[in-house]
Amino acid sequence: CWVQFEMWDSDDPVPRVELLKRVKGCEGILCVLTEKIDAQLLNAAGPNLKVVSTMSVGFDHLSLDELKKRGIRVGYTPDVLTDCVAELTVALLLATSRRLIEATHEAKTGGWGTWRTLWLCGHELANSTVGILGLGRIGVAIAERLKPFKVKKFIYTDVALRPELANMIEAEYVSLDELAKQSDFLAICCALTPETYGICNWNLFSKMKKNAIFINTSRGGVVNQEDLYEALSTGLIAGAGLDVTTPEPLPTHHPLFTLKNCVILPHVASASYTTRNSMSALAANNLLAGLRGEPMPKELKL
Ligand SMILES: O=C(O)C(=O)CO
């Protein structure tokens, strides 16, 4: 089908006022995760709007209730980014547990003296227990990559048992409490929903091991950052690697940036050329299928 489209031709997000003006009368919207698709925006678009296609696997920026109410279909981009996100998660985990950022800083700035027995010691994956909060495609892909590092045991928690996925990585289902207590490494892989908002808080951190490494490549909103700061600065847990924060960008004066045991990345888990190309192609195909009234390659069931 022929499609007339207007593109915001910049890597920076379209300003909200501009977006609200330009969506008027549109039948479809292709957005990224910086655009809030809420009642205000849907009202601004008007009754022609049939489909919203987001170039992301996460959909916490979409008001699903509002979309459903209006009968608007939603496309998203699962699967195509799984490998890329899992790879980055492993990189962030190792950078955090083996203190790579501190180490390169020391080497560059004169901190590198003689070889010292306990200098820059971290924690290794061999013989460890890895916990996964929210076992989906990405959690499985992370576990598959970590297994060759000789992880002893994978455990997970979720709102329901995930027997098929769990079997793929021989992961054992445990309660959230047990996940906190047993994990040497805890990877957060859940979607941000009202149930997971702030789920990583003092209650969780206080049950974790002193040697535990906390890794989040899902959404910043699942973490209570004040509690995480307390946990890291008091040595309650050993370290954290975050690819996502609240807000994004995290202000450079944020206390978390002062901590040596906190590695912060600017939301780059899916940032490979191959994956971003696949995501944009899938988002475009979802949009076109939605406009034609055909099944979308990846439709979010509302
Ligand atoms: O797809 C997502 O949800 C991201 O966070 C970026 O890939």
Image (cartoon, helix red, strand yellow):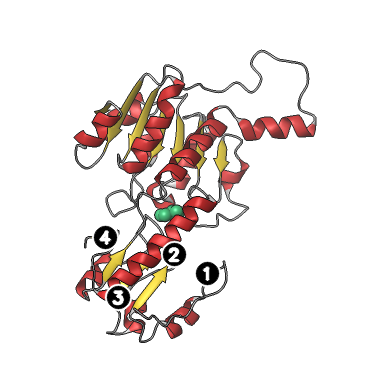
Q: Quadrant of ligand 1?
A: bottom left
Mark 4 closeness class: few <14, some 14–19, many ≥20 residues within 10 Å? some
Gap between marks 1 and 2 measured at Cα: 9 Å
Which callout, 3 or 4, points at the residue further toward the start of the chain? 3
Q: Nearer the viewer, residue 274 or 75?
A: 274
Percent position of residue 88, x then y: 50, 41
- Split into 4 quadrants, where in the image is the N terminus? bottom left
Q: Which residue is mark 3?
A: 291
Which callout, 1 or 2, points at the residue further toward the start of the chain? 1
Q: Work out whether 64 lies above or below 123.
A: below
Q: Residue furthest front?
A: 1
Which callout, 3 or 2, points at the residue further toward the start of the chain? 2
Percent position of residue 7, x then y: 49, 76
Tag 1 near tag 2, CB within 8 Å: yes
Q: Which residue is mark 4?
A: 300
Q: Nearer the viewer, residue 29 or 93?
A: 29
Gap between marks 2 and 4 measured at Cα: 15 Å
Percent position of residue 54, x then y: 38, 64
Q: Which residue is mark 2?
A: 32
